[in-house]
Image: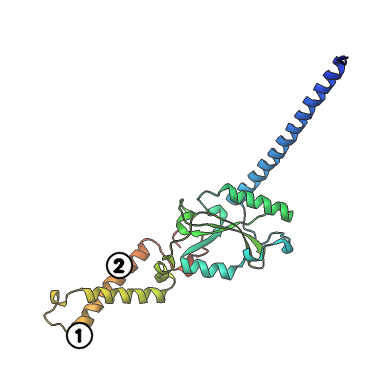
Amino acid sequence: MLKKTNVEEKLRAYRDRINAEKNILHQVQSILRKEQEKEVLIVNELTEGKDENFNNFTISKLDVDRVYHLDHIKKICIDYRLRFLASRYFKGKIPPEALIEIKSLEKQHQTQLKGFKIIAPSKLFKLENADDPLLFAPIGNGYYYLVHKWGGDLHPMRKFLVMPFRNLTNLIITVLMVSWVCTKMMPLGLFTGEDDAGSFWLLYMFMFKMIGSIVIFYGFALGKNFNTHIWNSKYFNA
């Protein structure tokens, strides 16, 4: 009572199954190819893109917590001696998660993002480092959207360690304080037989001149500048 086998039907069913599998495979390959092409465009924009001040975001779809004005970025860069530069100057590795986030935003807002910028320590624009870069895309009118953050956090003492370099006033105050500490630690008997206020302040002035000269020499020799001048400068010796 077994049904007879129709070879033609079996042949047709096998052909249709194989063609369906090939069609699915072709679709998958096509999707992967399109994704790879998108990643190539994104990487090219990150590494070679021109300066842009606007992206066609859909404002209603933006996360308000990730929107920052240039004034906010400038303040943090100055406080922590960071730079805010175009992504093409960045020499570290941009993680795959950042590319995924960019593709997700482009799909959500139906646009191609351009003009990427990164907040990072100066060293990260020359060599790799473990500090935390932040990738931004311009919205327009001085506003930027935080696309992705990676790496570790900054040292908790960084703000205080770089405070002397924020401006000339901070540097002078720091040199005065360091000179005072060094003078207090220095035995007056090495330089004078009298241990009085006049001898202390005279030694203090010499100490201030010495430390100030070292700071000036260090600054000019290595081409250093204050945080207020370098935060958005693309030059190494700014």
Q: What colouring style does the render use? A: rainbow
Sequence order check, earlier mark of 2 and 1: 1
Q: Position of residue 56 (x, y in %)?
A: 72, 59
* C-alpha gap between disc 2 and disc 1: 25 Å
Q: Amino acid at mark 1?
A: Gly
In the image, taking residue 164 as reference, residue 99 lies left or right, namely right
Q: Which residue is mark 2?
A: 214
Q: Is residue 2 above or below residue 186?
A: above
Image-quadrant location for residue 183: bottom left
Quarter of the image containing the N terminus?
top right
Q: Which residue is mark 1?
A: 198
In the image, taking residue 210 as reference, residue 109 lies left or right, namely right
Q: Is residue 225 above or below residue 1?
A: below
In the image, taking residue 97 as reference, residue 207 lies left or right, namely left
In the image, taking residue 155 as reference, residue 144 lies left or right, namely right
In terms of depth relative to the viewer, which is nearer, 61 or 45? 61
Q: Amino acid at mark 2?
A: Ile
